Amino acid sequence: MKKKIILSLFFLFLLFTMGSVMTMFYILRVTTRLDTLITLHQVEILRQDLVINVQTVQSHLYTLGTSFGKELDVIVENVATLDNAAQKCSGCHHSPEITSKIKTIQDLTEQYKEALSTFITTTAGRERVERLQIVAANIGNMILTKTQEMAFIANQKLNEKTIAAIKDVSSSRIILIVTLLLCFFIALAIAASLTREVTEPVSELLKATRKIKTGELGYTTSYAGKDEFKELLESFNDMSITLNENNKKIIQHLVRLSGLYRITLSFHAITNVEDIYKEVSYGIAELVEIEQCGVILLDKDKEFFTHRFPAFGLNQEQIANIRIPKENFIDIYRSSNRRPLTLNDNASALPFGEIDKNLNVKNLMLIWIRQKGELLGAIRVANKKSGDFSEEDSRILGILANNVSVALENAKLYENLKKQMAELKETQEELVQAAKLAAIGELASNIAHEINNPLTSILGYSELIKEETDINNIMRDIEVIEKESLRARDIVHQLLEFSRKRPLEIKEIQINDIMSEVLALAAVPLKDSNIKISKLYGDIPLIEGDANQLKQVFLNIINNAIFAMQGGGSLGVTTAMTDKDSVHIEIRDTGKGIPKEILQRIFEPFFTTKQEKGTGLGLSVSYKIIQSHNGRIDVESEEDRGTKFTIVLPVSVKQLF
Amino acid sequence: MKFIFNFILLFFVISMPFKVFAQEEILLGLIPEQNIFKQMERYRPLASYLSEKAGVKVRLTILSRYGDIVERFVARSLDGAFFDSLTGAMAITRMGVEPMARPVNLDGKATVRSYIFVRTDSKINSVKDMKGKKVVFVDMATATGYLFAVAFLHENGIHDINRYFNEYFFTGSHDSAIYSVLDNRADIGSAQDTIFNMLASKDPTIKRELHIIAQSEELPETTLCLRKSISSKIKNRITDILLHMNEDPAGKKILKKFGAVKFIRAEAGDFNSVFNLARRAQINIKEYKGTR
């Protein structure tokens, strides 16, 4: 193609050069002819000037007579011009005939000048002067005659040259047009041929690139040329095929990476090791088509590395046989230079010897699992279905091994966490119980007084019965005793009910009811401390919570209020709904208030202002209980003015819908 | 804007003097010493050189004849003329023109002589032989073409040329007079030696066929005389240019073409020889018109 283009361009160059040469030749020829014509016309003008000058001088000769006066200068100038015109003629190339005539005219001009000068300057007799005038005039006339003869010859030549020039112009025009048209059409044909030869493979290439653009990788063209374009398109075809193969590899990699990602992602949610073994084994089986796969880890007694169950392609019995002494396993690890061990075609070098042979291992790969530089175990992969284990398999499984290491560590941590959480829960429950008992303790003297009253009545009426004989009176006294006993039993029952250690019981409860029960429990100490109670229960929905724990919270706050109002005061309790999602409980007292410097510390465990009377657990436990109910507890206090506790608890979800 | 205004002003100021000079023109007359066309051709390069150097346009005009030179000088409003010795003397005497410069010919002389010549085959060797012959003069207003011949004839006892000669006529130019004798149109001729020698150098027949029988004393060569009323500045400038043109290569070239070595300063005293010759010819220059 390159050769063809160069040859075509060379041919075009030759064509245009020939055209240009011909054009220049004809232009030169025509312009030369025209130059000649112009020169001839100029000569004609010269001749005419000569004639005019001679005629002018002649007219002066005849009209002015012998007295020229001022006009002499004009004659002198005219003669000078005439002389110039005659001299100019001799500068051109002429035929001998014309040259001879020009010479004659020049001689005559010289004679004319002489005759004129003589005539002008002579002052002899009139006759002589007239004779001189005639002589000069005759010479002038001769010049005119000779000039006319020359004009006739010149005109003839001029005509001939004009006809020849016109012919030349005409033929030049035709030749130029033919040359230009010929050049144009030949150039057009060459350009069309070249364009076709260039555009055909280019459009084929364009079509192929579009196919590839739309995803049809591997598309090949079938261009049948023999030039560089064929090479280009063949190269393009190779590129397309390579592109397709590479694309397939990329997709394969992506599938593997996606599988790897899926497996490793699942590790984040797995908390027990069996699930890890299962995910790793079955996940690897999907990524690399193999027959056997599983995880080998160091036993608890740290003497053997054993295969873990579940595993892909191995039953429990087979797994149980894979048990390698720690030293042997570490030797294999070291001998592999701590790099993945791959055995594709050397059955005699199988690392676990008989174990592998019994499992019909054809090829095998061990990818080491390490944690903080220490060997934990390995992922064992055996019998790849399609060919040998590759470097890429090694890389992917290496990534997986790292993730397995992390997942195992996570599982271990999770196990520890679970244990600690259980312990914490137990401790918290004990703490709550202790706090509860402490709260009861605070009420104990009052409760004892409350129980003492029915007991006193019972004892009194028992004494009366001893002395009574009338059965009716006895029965009436027994009824009083029964009534007072029931009263005492209720009090004790309430105490037992509250103090009993029982598990968390979340159910729908009404806060207003809970608050009433607490106030009843604290009625005696409130009364004894001369504290007025004002209650304002709003129309509030049910909440989800543990009634006993919430009672404990409210009792703690009310106990603190009683302690703060030793000289009497008022206790305000308000329940309300400030928004549709939560219930607000407000407990206010008019006690001595909490100093600012300790206000931030009242929810800290074991922080108390009651000295030996308090445990410092009440408010801290209350804070935890409200937190576990997804609620909030706030306190506002002003010294000598009182304290306000606000508890916000979420409305039961069932109540919202 | 100011810059443009100043530039225009400067341009006018600078161009003004040249404009004044460009408008000035000096018209110089040429006497027909020879063929008037040749005479014009001889003086034209000199006029161009003067124009270029002096910054004054120098124009030439041919005076068709020597006679009535004073009247023609006035009538044509000439500023000056290249006068021959007699017309120069007449112009100095009657118009007071100032002689400025005259050329030194190629032979090193700034003077001319008058020749009286005959054809070799005419057998005229003395005034006696001239009787009844045809005589050609140049002009009555020339010293070399007429005055010397008249003086010569007077001194040889011929006082009336009308009676002594068969015919006499005036050609108006020296070369015509020479050719008139050479061509047998006249038997005796009188002309200036410089013209005679110049033609003889070009045309050998002149030397061969003409015979000089008398020659005058030295008379001043054609002299440039300028009108008195012309500003002395211009007069001096033109004179200076002429006097120094032999020192300038371009001027030297012009001089060569002109047929001179240089120009020398001319004075009225140079014309004393002419006045002497006039006395010998019994002519009073003060009253002499140079025409019949």
Image: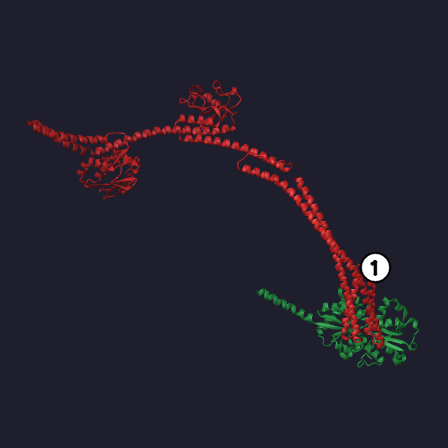
Horizontal arrangement in the rendering, residue A647 relative to residue B113 (left or right): left
Q: Is residue B284 visible?
A: yes
Q: Amino acid at mark 1?
A: Pro
Horizontal arrangement in the rendering, residue B183 relative to residue A347 (left or right): right
| In-front residue for pair B260/A54 | A54
Question: At 67% from the left edge and 46% from the top edge, which residue is drawn?
Answer: A185
- The picture places residue B284, in percent across and down from the top left corner, at 82, 81
- The picture places residue A226, in percent across and down from the top left corner, at 65, 36
Per the image, the residue denoted by label 1 is A96
Question: If the image is split into quadrants, where does the C terminus of chain A sit?
Answer: top left
| In-front residue for pair A285/A558 | A285
**Quarter of the figure with residue A186:** top right
Chain that is coloured green in the picture: B
Chain that is coloured red in the picture: A
Q: Are there few (<14), some (14-19), or many (20+) residues within 10 Å of tag 1?
A: few
**Quarter of the figure with residue A36:** bottom right
Question: At 77% from the left edge and 60% from the top edge, which residue is drawn?
Answer: A40
Question: If the image is split into quadrants, where does the N terminus of chain A sit?
Answer: top right
- Chain bearing tag 1 is A
Looking at the picture, does residue A192 appear above or below residue B84? Answer: above
- The picture places residue B27, in percent across and down from the top left corner, at 74, 73
Looking at the picture, does residue B252 appear above or below residue A265? Answer: below
Looking at the picture, does residue B187 appear above or below residue A415? Answer: below
